[in-house]
Amino acid sequence: MPVLLRSLPVNPATPVAITGYSATESGPETVGLGARRFKSQPIRAVAASAPPESCGRQCALRRNRLSSERPSAITWAAASPRAAARSAGAAGRAAPAWQTRGVNPSLLDRVRGADADAVYDGFVAWAGERGLTLYPAQDEAVIELVSGSHVILSTPTGTGKSLVAIAAHAAAAASGRRTFYTAPIKALVSEKFFALVEIFGAENVGMVTGDSSVNPDAPIVCCTAEILANMALRHGATTPVDQVVMDEFHFYGDPDRGWAWQVPLLLMPGAQFLLMSATLGDVTALAEDLERRTGRPVAQVTGVERPVPLHFSYEIRPVHEVLELLLKDGEVPVYIVHFSQAAAVERAQALSSMKIATREQRDAIAEALGDFRFSTGFGKTLSRMIRAGIGIHHAGMLPRYRRLVETLAQRGLLRVICGTDTLGVGINVPIRTVVVTELAKFDGTRMRQLTAREFHQVAGRAGRAGYDPYGNVVVMAPEWEIENAAALAKAADNPAKRKKIVRKKAPTGAVNWGKGSFERLVDAAPEALVPQLQLSAAMLINIIARGGDAFANVRSLVFNNHQTRAQQFALARRALAIFRTLRDAGIVEVSGGSIHLTVDLQPNFALNQPLSPFALAAIELLDPDDGVDAAGSGHYALDVVSVIEATLDDPRAILAQQEHKARGEAVAAMKADGLEYEARMDALEEVSYPKPLDELLRQSFEVFASSQPWVRDFELSPKSVVRDMFERAMSFSEFVSFYQLARSEGLVLRYLSDAYRAIRQTVPLEARTSELLDVIEWLGELVRQVDSSLVDEWEQLVHPLAASDEPVVPPAPPSVVANHRAFTVLVRNELFRRVQLAALQRDDELVALDPDAGWPGVLDAYFAENDEILTGGSARSPRLCAIDESATEWRVEQTIDDPAGDHDWRIRATVDLEASVDAGAAVVRVVEVVRL
């Protein structure tokens, strides 16, 4: 019994099942930490009914619902090569092979071609072989699913909703239907993808997240909610999906993303839905609407007791003291929740001086890591933390680092994890104790206290069914309250000392909380979900591309939804404004009383951002030939990139660092020029991050908005991240290091991925020059080289090579040389980097790159003849970079663009292909710089 819990009764009976049910399981009558005690608080709702003695009676009553569902043309592969050999399908034989061979059948073997009763029995048997006995709520949900009903499953965390989702997929497999799993974040989609691959086989499971696509035509597809919503908009009632499992369904009420959870419910009447979340609140109206639209009954399974009770406490001791007690008493793993990524990393670094793991535990971690490649700046920090037994987990990390932490945690190797509230979005990290560092967060607009839903989403992750008799939720008091308590404790019972204490107060503007806030959140039920339907140009494009009566389809979406009447009329006005924009931009037209697209868009064409119609118009202003009087900077390919970047959401952390860097360089230059302090400060106000084409884009935007006023609802934001990286000829790691973005590597990768997808899917084919295609290929390869763990891990699952207890080492990314076009761009960039440094006369940096090239003497000789080295658009033209390719080595000659146009200075270099493969980048060595 831990020190913090010694005064509390705890039932020692612990079930063996991981997510199952045991009749012996019960929680303590009272739970709590410290001085506070109160009754265990389950999520408030009507308890689910107990399971029937057998499924037969109830399933038979509902079986006709399954027979009425339309089958899909989906082929389910065997769950594995071994399963394929023993099971070629249920039809045409008396018994499946596994029954005659005496082997344990896979879940697919059990349910393939079975009726509702057999599917239920097969799933229960499969679960039983894994030590899982269904809880009553699970059992009720599975019965409803195999009978064809929709299910709204709102039960506390730890009651096995994931097992119900597996049953749903199995029920779809039984009748050859196609089933989708959706979630709000890519990390959760990825995790569920790998979990389902293990159960149903790599051949049967795919994943699509927008910038990653693995086996997308599989009968089970894991995707982000927006992917399915866009499919529903494009195909309507004929969307080729028969069943949808929506995880974390409380995102239905998210102001920015809730539309993606509502659209499938509106437009896919033939699909069966399983809606899951631990914090839904009252969903009666939603259930009634879903039944009205689809004709299927809706079963609400809600409000069961947690299988693992929670112990709540409010702590006024410092975090490190609380953690020491938790570690001493074995209340691990501990997840320390922060509401900023920087705070999570800082906490992990602060804890590194504590003895978190024993020598034996550290050795086990090192063995599990094997040769894992921590290749980036943050990777070095993470490696040091992990080897000390401390994990870091937040959305700003590279996906492969997040997955590493999750895998090590699942193996029980990490005792403490410092992370953000992404923990509350269903990430499968085993946790016994959740420590919440504060009850306030920044929501993107302002600081505020946590809602009841946000609190319970995080708190509910504590306690692992089958492992823990209880879970701990420790909420920290504000720092000023902790400091006041420490001062009072130091003064003890001395009245004079206590009188002298100056109590600290919350800083001005800070959001305060206290024990009362804590108790209110613990006792509160989740707030009711509020529907959040939106309309964008991309949504309208998808509906029009569906064909048929586009006007009727849009009207149905606008007026037949879950919004209030006033909101519906606002949506109608917005739809009309967007339509006029698309019509005036020449994307759609009205003829013969029908609305249709004017061009055949490529299959992956999408107007990804609200300002994409403006982007299309702005691209038309640019001259692909970079004529003398052409608009733009004189580099068409990079100008197109800048147009697209101006329509993307701002990556604030990157822009802040770019501005910081620019101001630092400006201050240095002004000091060198002898500018006085006050003049420097005034001039500094005008220095910001790079904004290519700022004036051109803003003028064009005003002209565009004069006829399309709705675009003023969105802010045009010129910026240069992709372009800056390309122009500086930097690798991902160099860019992160240059701008000190180690804590935001994941943000950088995500922005690059979004930019790559937006450029590839938005820029029309006819606007793509050879140089622009080079940039697109370079960007795509850069993203893949940084983190290709998703695709590569799936390949390993299809062709397994190692046992599950092997070190957690992902395969190396694909050879950088294999993508010839992208590698050629990397080589040219390396040469042009030398040109840029030479133009700035940065001898030291050039010598560091090429110690034997004699750069100082070369620059002296060049600038004795010329005033400058040109670095504009024409200077980096592929025509000035000649490449002679061979099997093991390339020879490159870069011509320097001088003001007179003599082009008589050349940089000659070699490219080591083998070294480039190992480095994942072009390894270039300058041999000489000569004047012809």
Image (cartoon, helix red, strand yellow):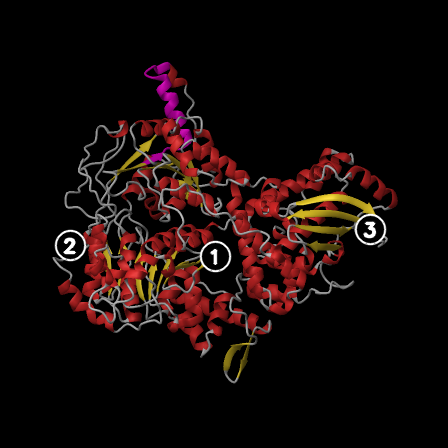
**Residue 457 x/y as whole percent:** 34, 46
Which residues fall within the magenta stretch? 474-496
Q: Residue at x 50, y 35 (%)?
A: 381
- Circles 1 and 3, Cβ within 8 Å, touching? The answer is no
Q: Is residue 928 left or right of residue 93?
A: right
Q: Residue at x 15, y 56 (%)?
A: 51
Residue marked by disc 3: 898
Query: Between 752 and 631, which is closer to the camera in this rendering?
Result: 752
Q: Nearer the viewer, mark 3 or mark 2?
A: 3
Residue marked by disc 2: 50
Report the magenta stretch's main SS.
helix
Q: How many marks?
A: 3
Q: Which disc is residue 212 wearing? A: 1
Query: Between 901 and 422, which is closer to the camera in this rendering?
Result: 901
At label 1, counting other C-alpha atoms closer than 10 Å, the crowd grade (few under 14, some 14-19, many 20 or more) is some
Q: Secondary structure at mark 2?
A: loop
Quadrant in the rendering for residue 324: top left
Q: CA distance from mark 1 to mark 3?
A: 43 Å
Identity, as a three-letter code, of the amino acid under mark 3: Asp
Q: CA distance from mark 3 to mark 2?
A: 84 Å
Quadrant in the rendering for residue 217: bottom left
Q: Is residue 159 above or below residue 246?
A: above
- Circles 3 and 2, Cβ within 8 Å, touching? The answer is no
Q: Is residue 551 left or right of residue 738?
A: left
Which residue in the rendered view is the most extreme toward the bottom?
Answer: 592
Q: Earlier in the sequence, mark 3 or mark 2?
A: 2
Query: Between 80 and 872, which is closer to the camera in this rendering?
Result: 80
Q: Is residue 327 magenta?
A: no
